[in-house]
Amino acid sequence: MKKNYCLLLFCLTFFIPQLVFSQQMTVKKAAYFRKSKPLAEMTAVLPGLRDRSWKDSLVRNLAFDEHHPLVGQLTPAQPDPVRQISPPSIPNAGPILNFAGIGNVNGVYPPDTEGDVSPDYYFQMINLSFAIYDKQGNLLFGPVNNSTLWNGFIGPWTGTNDGDPVVLYDELADRWLASQFAVNTSNGTYWQLIAISQSPDPMGSYYQYAFEFPAFNDYPKFAVWPDAYYASFNMFGNYLRVAAAAFERDAMLAGDPNARMVLFDLPPNSDPWSMLPSDFDGNPPPNGAPNYFAYFTDNGFGAQEDAFKIWEFHVDWINVNNSSFQPVVSLAVAPFDAYFCDAPRGACIPQPSSDQGLETLSDRLMYRLQYRNFETYQTLMACHSVDFDGLAHAGIRWYEFRKTGTNPWAIYQQGTWAPDDLNRWMPSIAMNAIGDIALGYSVSSESYSPSIRYTGRTANAPLGQMNLQEAEIITGYYAQSNFGRWGDYAMMAVDPADDTSFWFTTEYVRNSWKTRIAKIRFDASPSLFAFAGPDTLICNIVPYNNLLSTANNYRTVAWTTSGDGHFNQPHEPHSIYFLGPQDKLSDSVKLSLTAFGYDLLSQLTDSMTLFLHPSPYCNAGKDTLICTGDPAYLNGVVYNADSIFWSTYGDGYFSDPYSLNTTYFPGNNDVNKGYVNLKLTAIPIAPCFFPIEDLMKLSIHVCTSTYEMAKDNPVIEVVPNPVHQIVQIRLKGFSHAPLSLQILDIKGNLLFSRNFKDFSEEITQTIDLNLVPSGTYLIQVVQEQKAIQKKLIKN
């Protein structure tokens, strides 16, 4: 929507006639074809980080304002005229199934999240991997690289895995279609690879096809129709344009190697951009009905009006020259603004604690353009992102178009879903067989991490109104820093098993991007549940791995503690708790699990007590020095233990290895080495299981110097010995030559020294050892380069 255009520009825009395009049609057979082995027997190509820098030179990735230059004032003079004001009235208990999809296993941005559902399987395909699940959310196969589907299919694309995937379930044929482009090829050519399952089992065999394109076939979007598989592309070559293709569905389902493609490659200056083909659910369209392609225009970018444009693609496989692709109707819609801000690539959606915005892709309709045939009328469902207040807040414009009999398509209802200032974008919409509408999307703001929500509308709601309260499928945490890419699309599918349940998949953020898959029913009432686990006794030195905790029907959970420890995954039902220093001094700590409901209001907390049994304390004593020929008197300290035992790394023995207070008698090898390491082991009491060990080093010295002292046999007297505090050292029988009295620890560190030059025949030195740690020390007298030593024991 634009306001305040200059008069000249208005006149020029108003009188430009709608272009009628000449047919530029190409018919091509599949250049390559192969029948594959069953997927379960193919070599699975496991995901890994991929270098995607090659794509930068191929894709200009123009933002909308570059493709359609801004010509008008975008700030609306009034709020979005169809923004829903009244709050929804029907409570929303949330999805009935909610499980993790594929994460960022290839290290790429964005995920291009795609997925579809059959009566027995859910098939998710992202950029650049896929996985297959049963309908209870159990992973059956994957994730593997998308290239696994074409493994052994040799061509210029061999070795590539280029992405932009689409997967669709063909409910008329009970088959699967999977596709991705191949553009980083060995010979510079561009291809669309398509795999059609040969049975309803997505892990069975496939018919593999490759169709060549005249330029880079970016952003492929597929749709199932009775007479063809239709697809749209944004083409990057000498000029930007849209191409539309019809692939010969009947031939491809039969495994015909000559299956054809009819391609309309639009000429320069054509208006369409990022068109979507219509993909049907439920009853097929009337016989001979063309496939409907659509896109929108914004008068803020030079169009005559804010409008929804519908084209018809008619393919005639008997006489392909009768095929056509032409515009049929332009519907003026309620004014809107598709422009958000001038950030590169339109990365305007804010995130918490980050300057990195996320892309809106507000220049295009979001996948799918869903079609339904209710016999008395036909519907198309469409949606896209808009700036609903002129302040770059994103809301979702959605539409239901109807075609009755031979009348042209008309707007049946439209609305903008923006109940508050939280940004809602990257949507996908679908209608089920009873007319209920589900709308899924991403949410984010400066204070709210990118998360996944949905709302809905029952068939009897006021027109343009979502009457199902908003629910959050999964709550995100943190921000996607350094990368603005988001989407590029999401997928809301309808379950063909009942034609009423919805399945939605898209991305959210928890550190990196992740994807989620949810099954939604409006009439379901899943109950919020949280169980923190039973009260448990553990040893206080090990983390607590809580395997019995659980939660159901939640958008997020949060663990809290009464102590000072931390959880490794505080927002997952199963988490490991690491005890903090204060926890270890306590006999218990309370852990609480809070589950937050889908409805954004309800929450439920459950707690458990973690009783902490002290682990053994074990101290073998300080390193000790003994004299050769002496035993070592050991006094270990152990508590909170079931039993203890001593062991040696030498060849000596203990008087009683199972007593804390024991005597060690060194062996010959111990004496020859001059030391031995002794180990004290404490055996814990359950629930502690790990023995606690402590080592002490026993040094063994010859305590009389090899140098002969004076002939009158000098003596060192130590009184008392062992000593607790005050000790007297008396030196007798030394010559009158200067001497040094020293006290050393068993490691040889000097603790005290006194030099004597003039003295009588006896020297007395009193020492206060009160602050000296208990242990064995060495008193040494050095005189005339000779030494004599004596052991001192401090208790």
Image: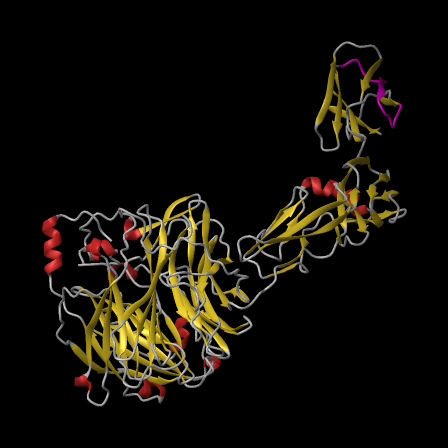
Q: Is residue 69 left or right of residue 174?
A: left
Residue 74, image x and y in percent?
Answer: 24, 49
Which residue occupies the foreground of this view, 499 or 463? 463
Which residue occupies the foreground of this view, 707 or 740? 740
Does the stretch in magenta take in 734?
yes
Residue 391, image x and y in percent?
Answer: 32, 45
Residue 102, visible in the rendered structure? yes
Q: Which picture quadrant has residue 298? A: bottom left
Which residue occupies the foreground of this view, 79 or 50? 79
Work out whether 331 lies above or below 567.
below
Q: How is the image coloured?
A: secondary structure
Does the stretch in magenta take in 546?
no
Residue 128, visible in the rendered structure? no
Residue 633, image x and y in percent?
Answer: 86, 38
Which residue occupies the foreground of this view, 117 or 81? 81
- Taking the spot 82% from the left edge, 52% from the top edge, the residue there is 685
Q: Is residue 704 left or right of residue 433?
A: right
Work out whether 352 lies above or below 307.
above
Q: Is residue 426 left or right of residue 759?
A: left
The number of callouts visible is 0
- Taking the spot 29% from the left edge, 61% from the top edge, the residue there is 364
Please tell me whether the stretch drawn in magenta is mainly helix, strand or loop: loop
- Taking the spot 81% from the left edge, 16% from the top edge, the residue there is 735
- Taking the spot 30% from the left edge, 50% from the top edge, the residue there is 340
The C terminus - image quarter: top right
Q: Is residue 302 left or right of residue 437?
A: left
Work out whether 630 lies above or below 521.
above
Work out whether 311 lies above or below 36.
above
Residues shaded magenta: 720-737
Q: Which picture quadrant has residue 171? A: bottom left
Residue 282, image x and y in percent?
Answer: 41, 79
